[in-house]
Amino acid sequence: MADHYEVLGVSRDASTDEIKKAYRRLARELHPDVNPGADASERFKMVTHAYDVLSDARQREQYDLGGQGGGFDGGNFGNFGDIFETFFGGGGASRGPRSRRERGQDALIRVELDLDDVIFGTHRDIEVDTAIVCETCHGTCCQPGTAPVTCDICHGTGTIQRAVRSLLGNVMTSSPCGTCRGYGTVIATPCVTCQGQGRVRARRTVPVDIPAGVDTGLRLQMPGSGEAGPAAGPNGDLYLEMKVRHHDVFSRNGDDLLCTLEVQMTDAILGTTATVRALDGDIDIELKPGIQSSEIITVKDRGVTRLRGSGRGDLKVGVQVVTPTKLDHKERDLIQQFASRQKARSPELSHFQQGMFAKLRDRFLG
C-alpha cells in the first residue's frame, strides 16, 4: 500500500492545513471532470483515501503507529482482515469479484440569479456537462452483441491464491487477479464509443424549480442528477450553489428589502405621496409633512418570500431629504423670507444616532 504522506506529497510532520492544501491542489488536478484518464481516476481515489486518513487526528495517529488507515473503531476489522488474508487466504471467506458498477461523482453547478428571481422563485433549465450512460452499449462496456467473458486466470473469482513459505510454514495468500483487475471477467471487445467505460461525457439539460427566498451561498441538492457511474452505476447527486447578483437600487437584509428614497426639500416640508417602482410592481408611499432624513418607512409584505415558512418580509425605505444646491434670485429670496419667519436655533451637536438608516448608509458607503 502506498504511503499516504507520499501520495499527498507532504512530510510526516505536516500540519493539518498543509495536508488540506496538498489535497485541494491534487484534487483539482486529478478530478475526473478535469482529467478523465483512467490513471488520473485511480490516483484521485488514492489521494482522497490518503486525505480521509490523515485529516482525521485519530486515524492519522493510528496510521503513524503502523496502521493501514481507517483506524480501529470497535466495528472495523479491516486491518485484522488483511492479516487473515495474508496468512489464511482471505480469512476463510472469499470476498468475490469486484463489481464494475460504481456510483458516479457528485457535481456542483453555480447558478446566478437576479434579486427579482428570489422574491417568488423561478424556473431554470440548467445546462450540465457531465457523464451519462453510453447509448451504444447501454452501460455494458461491451460492443453490442458481445458480453464480458469469464477470466481464464482466476476463473471468475477475481483473486489469485498462491502458496508462500513463511515462519508458520506454507500459507496461502490471496491478491486481486492482475488479468481482470479483480472483476472476474474480461471485456474482450470494449465498446468503441465509451472505450469500455459504460459512460460518455455529454451536455444535458436539467429542469430546476428554484424556490423563493434563496440567498447567495445556499446549495440545493438534486439526488440522482449528478454523474452516471461506470458500467451504468447509479448517478451521483447534483448540487446547485446560488449566487444573487447585486442590484443597483435594492439590497437584502434577511427577508427584508432595503432602499433609499430621495425626497425634495419642499416635499419633505409639505408632505406628498410618491409612487415608486418596486421589484414586483408600483408602490404608493405617503410622506407626511415635516418628514426628516434617516426616517424609515416600512411597507409590509413587499420583501422576499420566506424560504422556510410563510409570508414575505418587508420593504424598508430610508428617507434622504435632498437640499437644493442651485437657486435663482427669486428662489433664494423666497427661502430667505421663509428663514426670517422661522425662529430657528443655531446648529448644535447631538448624540450620534445609530439605527436602520445607519445600516443603510453603511451599506452604500461600504
Image (tube, grey):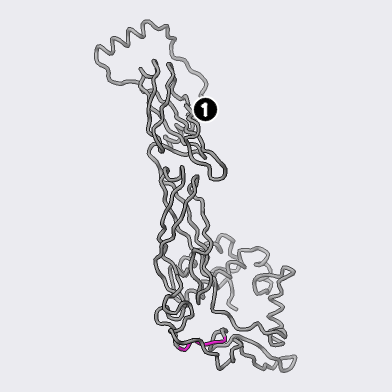
**Residue 308 appears in the rendering:** yes
Task: Examine the rendered structure and indicate whether residue 100 appears above or below residue 295.
Answer: below
User: Is 76 on the left-hand or right-hand side of 178?
Assistant: right
Q: Quadrant of the C terminus?
A: top left
Q: Report the residue marked by disc 1.
A: 354
Q: Position of residue 58 (x, y in %)?
A: 68, 64
Number of labels in the image equals 1
Magenta span of residues: 184-188
- Residue drawn at the location 55% of the way across and 93% of the way down: 152
Mark 1 lies on a secondary structure that is loop
Q: Is residue 187 magenta?
A: yes
Q: Nearer the viewer, residue 254 or 331?
A: 254
Count neighbours of disc 1 (C-alpha within 10 A) and say few if under 14, some if 14 to 19, many if 20 or more: few
Q: Nearer the viewer, residue 251 or 164?
A: 251
Q: Quadrant of residue 276?
A: top left
Q: Amino acid at mark 1?
A: Gln
Q: Main secondary structure of the magenta part?
A: loop
Q: Is residue 337 magenta?
A: no
- Single out the residue that lies furthest toward the front: 145
Q: Position of residue 123 (x, y in %)?
A: 43, 52
- Single out the residue that lies furthest toward the left: 329
- Residue drawn at the location 48% of the way across and 54% of the way down: 241
Q: Position of residue 229 (x, y in %)?
A: 51, 72
Q: Quadrant of residue 247?
A: top left
**Residue 7 appears in the rendering:** no
Q: Position of residue 213 (x, y in %)?
A: 50, 44
User: Is 139 on the left-hand or right-hand side of 326?
Assistant: right
- Residue drawn at the location 40% of the way across and 28% of the way down: 261
Task: Examine the rendered structure and indicate whether residue 175 appears above or below residue 131.
Answer: below
Q: Quadrant of the N terminus?
A: bottom right
